[in-house]
Amino acid sequence: MQSAVDQFLPSLQSLGLWGYWVIGAFAFLEALVLTSVFAPATVFVVFAGLLTAQGVYDFGDMVWFVAIGAILGAESSFRLGTKGGHIFRQGRRFFSDANLQRARRFFNKYGSASLVIGRFFGPLGAVVPFVAGLSDMRRRSFHLWNIVGGFAYSAGLLSLGYFFGTALDLMTATITRAGLFLGGLTGALALIWFLVARLRRTLPFVRSILQSVFTAIGENPDFQSLAKRHPRISRFLAARFSKAAFLGLPTTILGAAFAYFLVLFIGSNLDFILNAPIIQADTRIAKLLYALRDPALVNVFTVITAFGFWKVVIVIATGASVMMWLGKHPHYIIALWAVLIGNQVTVTAMKNIFARPRPELAVFTEHSLSFPSGHSAVSVACFGLLTYIIIRERYLPALLAGAIGLTMIGLIGLSRIYLVEHYFSDVVNGYLVGALWALLGIWLAELLQEKGIGIWQPLARRWRNFWVLIVAAATVGAIVVAVDHYDPVKNTAIARVENQPETTLEDAFTQHRFPVFTETITGAHQEPVSLIILAADRETFVAGIKKAGWQLADAPGFATMGRAAFAAWFNVEYATAPVTPAFWNAQPHDYGFQKETPDKSLRRRHHARFWDTHSRTADGLMIFVGTASFDISLKWGVTHHIDPNIDAERDFLADDIRASGLVQSERALQIVQPSLGQNLSGDPFFTDGDAVVLELGTGS
C-alpha cells in the first residue's frame, strides 16, 4: 500500500535534492525577524523529518540544511538588532512594541539560553536574536549559542517528524477500536476544556457590554418617563436587578436559567410522548453501538458508570458533607441532600409515569425503568452542585473545577449510552432533570447563607485542616472500594429467531412485513431495497458475493472508520474499507461489500450493504436484502457523493453475481413505484423501483 505521506506532499518529493534547499530556506526565513511571521518553518521541518523516515530524504543531510538555514537567519536578525529597534513601532501588528517587550522579557529571563529555547516558539525565536543585538550581546557568545540553538532546533523537530513517520504505518495497522475511540474522546474533552477557558476570558467583556447597555437604558429619558408613570412595576424590576440582595439579580439569573432548562425538560417529555424523531433514533443508536461494542471500552465505561451508582454517590456526598461541616458551611450540606432527595424522587416518579423498558441490548441487567436516566440526572445534580461549591469557595480555579465537572458529567452520560443501559433520549432528559435540581440547590444554598445559616466554628482552624485531610483521604478510599465492588449482572444477549415468512416474498413487501426502504438513524426513508439474495445459509451468501469479485468490507468500527477516513483524505488504497452504517427495519447493515475501481481509490468505489432478515422462504432459503451505489467523489471531506443512477449499480452487482455461475434462478420484483429521492447526506437518486431477486447455489 502506497504511503499516505507519499500522497500528502508529492510536490515536495518531486523536488529531489532541491527539497533540502527548500526546507533550509524556510528555516532561514522563520529565523529572520522580517519574514518569520510569514514562514511557518516548524511545520515543514517536522514534515521533512517524517519524509526522512519514509526514505525520501537522508536524515543527517537534512539536519545540516535546516541547522544552517536557522543559524544564518538568526545571525541576520542579530545584525538587524545592532542597527536599532526602529522596525518595531506602536500600531504594527507583528512588529509592535508589545512583541518587542515580550521578547525582551524572555531574553532577560533566560539569558543566553533564550537563543536555544526561543527557537521552539515560532516567530518569537526570530525576535530574541534581534533583542540580543539591541542589548549589545557579545558576538562570540551569540555565535556559540546561535549554533547550539540551530542544531537543537533542527535535530529536535526532525526527530519528532521521524518518530511520527516510523509510527504511522504501525499505528494504522495495530490501533484498536478502543484506542481510537479514546483518542477521539480525549479530543472531545480537550475541546470542552478549551471552550471553558474561552468562556472565562469572554465573561469580563460580556459583563462590560451588558453593564453599558443597562446604564444606557437607565439614562434614557423615555425609559425614565415610563418608570415614573408605573412606579410599582419599576420598583419590582429594580429589585429584580439589584445586586444588593440575593433575591435580586442573583435570583433573577438563576430563575432565568431554571426557566430555560424547564422549557427544554418539557420539550423532552413531549418528544417522548409524541414519538419525535429523536425517540425514533434511540433504537437505531442502541443497535449501532451494540454492533460497535468493544470489550476494552466496556471495561472502561463500566468503571466510569459506577460513579453514577447510588452507593458511590452516597459515599461522595457523605464525604463532602463532613468536609463542609468542618469548613463551617452547613448551608451547602442542606442544599446538597435536598437536591439528592428531590432528584431521586423526580426520577423515580418519571420512570413510573413513562414506564419505558430498558434496552434489550444492554451490557448489564438493570431492573428499573429507562426514562429518564438516573445516573445522568444525579451526575448533574450532585457533581454540578459540588462544582459550584468548589468554585464559590475558591477551593480550585474556576476553569479547572468547571472543566473537571463537565468532563465527569459528560463521561457518565456517555457511559450509559455506550453500554446501552439507556437510550440517548433517556440521558438527555436525565441531564435536564439534574440541571433543574442543581439550580434549585444553588438557589437554596445562597438563600440559606444570606439568612445566616452556618455561622459556627466547630473546631479550631489547625484541627479543622487536619480533619479535612483525614476525611478527604477516607472518602477517596471509600470511593475506590465502592467502584471496585460495582459488579452488576451481565445481560444475556437476546438471539434473533429465524422464522418462515407467513406469505410469499412478494406479499412480505407489499404487506409491509418487510420494509421497502432503508432508513437514516432517525427513520427517514433512503434508497429502496434493490437486491434480494436467497441462499441456503450465510456462508453461501458471503461466498457468492466474493466469487462475484466483491470484497467483504471490514466491519464498521472506530478503528476501521478512522482508517477509511484517513485513506479517503489522503487518497490511499484500502481495499476492504468499511461501509458507512445504514439501517433497514431499524437494524444496521450486517454485511458490507465493495469493489475497487481501476484507480484503486477510496474516493471512487462500488459498494453494497446487505441485511440478514432472519427469515426464510417456504423452501428454507435465507433472505438477504440490500442496496448498492457508486461513490464518485468525497463530500465535505467526511462522506461520499453517490451516482444518482442507483439502478445502474444494482445491475452492475447483479451482472457480477451472474458471471460467477452461482445463480440458480432470478426474477424482478416491483418494490416501489419509479421515484426520485435523497439519501442522508442530501445526494439525489432515481430508481425504477425494481429489486433483482437472485437465488444462489453452492457451485459444487
Image (tube, rainbow, N blue to C red):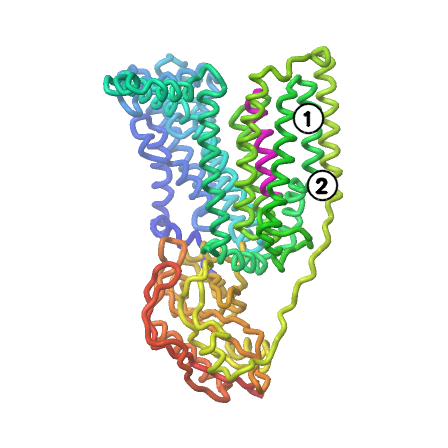
Query: Where residue 263 sits: x, y (%)?
Result: 45, 40
* Nearer mark to the viewer, of 1 and 2: 1
- Please name the amino acid that badge 2 sits on: Val
- Residue reaching furthest left? 222
- Give the residue drawn at x 60%, y 51%: 370
The quarter holding residue 430 reads top right
Q: Residue 696: give x, y in percent of width and height.
A: 52, 84
Q: Does the magenta run of residues contain 474?
A: no
Q: Which residue is depicted at the point 38% across and 70% down?
A: 598
Residue named by callout 2: 483
Label count reads: 2
Magenta stretch: helix, strand or loop mostly: helix
Query: Which quadrant does the C terminus fall into?
Result: bottom right
Q: Give the magenta part as a residue range.
A: 375-394
Closer-to-camera residue (667/81): 667
User: Dividing the picture into quarters, in which one does residue 604 lie?
Assistant: bottom left
Q: Is residue 357 visible?
A: yes
Query: In the image shown, does 596 or 153 lie closer to the viewer?
Result: 596
**Residue hosting label 1:** 321
Residue drawn 34% across and 62% down? 683
The reply to whether callout 1 and callout 2 are in contact (CB within 8 Å) is: no
Give the Cα distance between marks 1 and 2.
20 Å
